[in-house]
């Protein structure tokens, strides 16, 4: 009889640097943790590795100068605009600096009252009180300040992002609109800087005849020896110093398979492996979605594919077995779990209320919460019993 279900352990590792043998260091860290703390390793365990250490050991960096060269190549060094960047010093300030270096005049169109991941630029109650309709009303900076005085200070950082983004370059002008085509009143050269809505924004602008690209089309090849990401370009990048960013890692499919093979060789266990970035969850106070990366997991081994196939215990306990109790109820529920349809993603009344999300998104979100984003020093997460259920206890 087991008395615990899913467990997730943050694994303490060395501080990884460019060129380190990441696979062997991760395996060694897991083995040391298992030996020192007395837990076993099992078939079906999941080893999740944050994208940051994968990109760092790969040396996947780009400088502002390298980024600006591609901006000049695609927009000819002329006036240009960007639409819907997120409000983030870590995620976008350095990109804004690089983009501003590659153009004469830069129009920055912000969405309001918040960016696409929930960072508030404007208090929603203030917007309602002023009778502003975010679906219809567009502003340049002076018009916006004429209505609101200034933008909202970010709840957690204390930053006024209008002022912060303006301060990055003396050629920057701020606009506020949720209509992608509004930027075309100022320039026909447009870089779409949104993340999850980027394809729609790009399509709308392209249909209007704009010279337009997306962030995933910038730095998708090496520029003067820079790092790159062929699929995501600048999406998923983070500030990595005064003049460079770390890009989303490359060759992650190869990495997870290599890690899985090394774990099998050293432990004899078949484990699932993944690379994870931001989790997909929302802060209830600030309203911020964590997911500023293009995906939660760029790569994972085959055992993590698909969606959970679960039934809702509390539903069948109330509905089907409502007259039972004690050991009789336990045995009936365990039997029903063992007999459930094995088709992944099957939708029926017994599964209503279970989480309809992809397994790698769920596991990646769990891993992000465990590892945190600060000084925990656990960029590797070991998850056990994830695929077990009540019938196995």
Image (spheres, rainbow, N blue to C red):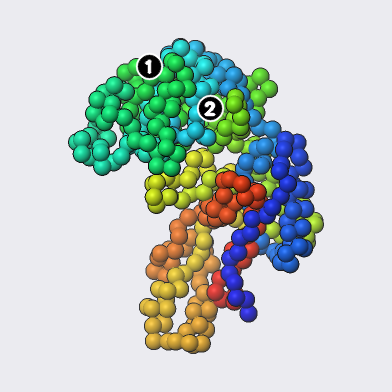
Residue pictured at 58% horizontal, 65% vertical:
6
Tell me which corner region of the image, top left, top right, bottom left or bottom right, holds residue 41.
Answer: bottom right
Residue 212 in sight: no
User: Horizontally, is 167 left or right of 272 in the view?
Assistant: left
- SS at mark 2? helix
Rendered location of residue 384, percent (x, y): 63, 63
Q: Work out which quarter of the rendered image holds the C terminus and state it.
A: bottom right
Residue pictured at 58% horizontal, 45% vertical:
374
Please report whichever mark, 1 or 2, sits nearer to the chain's N-terminal start. 2
Choose between 179 and 65: the one closer to the eye: 65
Residue pictured at 73% horizontal, 56% vertical:
30
Q: Work out which quarter of the rendered image holds the N terminus and state it.
A: bottom right
Check disc 2 and report the residue beneath it: 94
Q: Residue 220, relative to residue 328: is it above or below?
A: above
Choose between 339 and 392: the one closer to the eye: 392
Q: Residue 310, relative to residue 284: is it above or below?
A: below
- SS at mark 1? loop
Rendered location of residue 128, percent (x, y): 22, 40
Q: Residue 336, relative to residue 9: is it above or below?
A: below
Q: Which mark is residue 187?
A: 1
Q: Residues within 10 Å of mark 2 (few under 14, many from 20)?
A: many
Rendered location of residue 39, percent (x, y): 71, 66
């Amino acid at each position: 009889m087991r008395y615990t279900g899913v467990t997730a352990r943050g694994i303490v590792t060395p501080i990884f640097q460019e060129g380190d043998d990441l696979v062997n260091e991760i395996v060694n860290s897991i083995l040391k943790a298992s030996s020192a703390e007395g837990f076993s390793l099992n078939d079906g365990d999941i080893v999740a590795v944050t994208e940051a250490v994968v990109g760092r050991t790969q040396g996947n960096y780009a400088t502002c100068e390298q980024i600006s060269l591609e901006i000049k190549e695609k927009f000819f060094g002329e006036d240009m605009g960007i639409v819907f960047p997120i409000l983030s010093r870590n995620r976008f300030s350095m990109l804004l600096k690089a983009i501003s270096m590659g153009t004469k005049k830069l129009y920055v169109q912000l969405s309001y009252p918040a960016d696409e991941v929930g960072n508030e630029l404007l208090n929603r109650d203030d917007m309602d009180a002023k009778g502003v309709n975010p679906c219809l009303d567009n502003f340049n900076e002076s018009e916006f300040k004429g209505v609101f005085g200034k933008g909202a200070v970010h709840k957690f950082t204390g930053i006024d992002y209008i002022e912060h983004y303006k301060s990055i370059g003396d050629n920057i002008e701020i606009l506020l609109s949720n209509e992608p085509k509004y930027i075309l009143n100022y320039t026909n050269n447009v870089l779409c800087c949104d993340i999850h809505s980027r394809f729609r924004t790009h399509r709308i602008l392209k249909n209007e005849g704009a010279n337009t690209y997306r962030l995933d089309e910038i730095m998708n090849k090496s520029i003067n020896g820079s790092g790159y990401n062929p699929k995501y370009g600048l999406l998923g990048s983070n500030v990595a110093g005064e003049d460079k960013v770390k890009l989303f890692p490359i060759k992650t499919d190869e990495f997870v398979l290599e890690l899985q093979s090394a774990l099998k060789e050293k432990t004899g266990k078949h484990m699932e492996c993944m690379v994870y970035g931001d989790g997909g969850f929302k802060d209830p106070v600030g309203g911020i979605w964590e997911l500023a990366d293009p995906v939660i997991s760029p790569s994972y081994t085959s055992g993590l594919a698909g969606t959970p196939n679960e039934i809702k215990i509390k539903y069948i306990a109330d509905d089907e077995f409502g007259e039972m109790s004690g050991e009789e109820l336990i045995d009936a529920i365990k039997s029903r779990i063992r007999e459930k349809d094995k088709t992944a993603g099957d939708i029926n009344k017994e599964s209503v209320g279970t989480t309809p999300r992809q397994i790698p998104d769920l596991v990646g979100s769990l891993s992000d919460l465990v590892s945190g984003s600060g000084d925990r020093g656990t960029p590797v997460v070991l998850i056990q019993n994830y695929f077990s259920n009540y019938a196995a206890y």
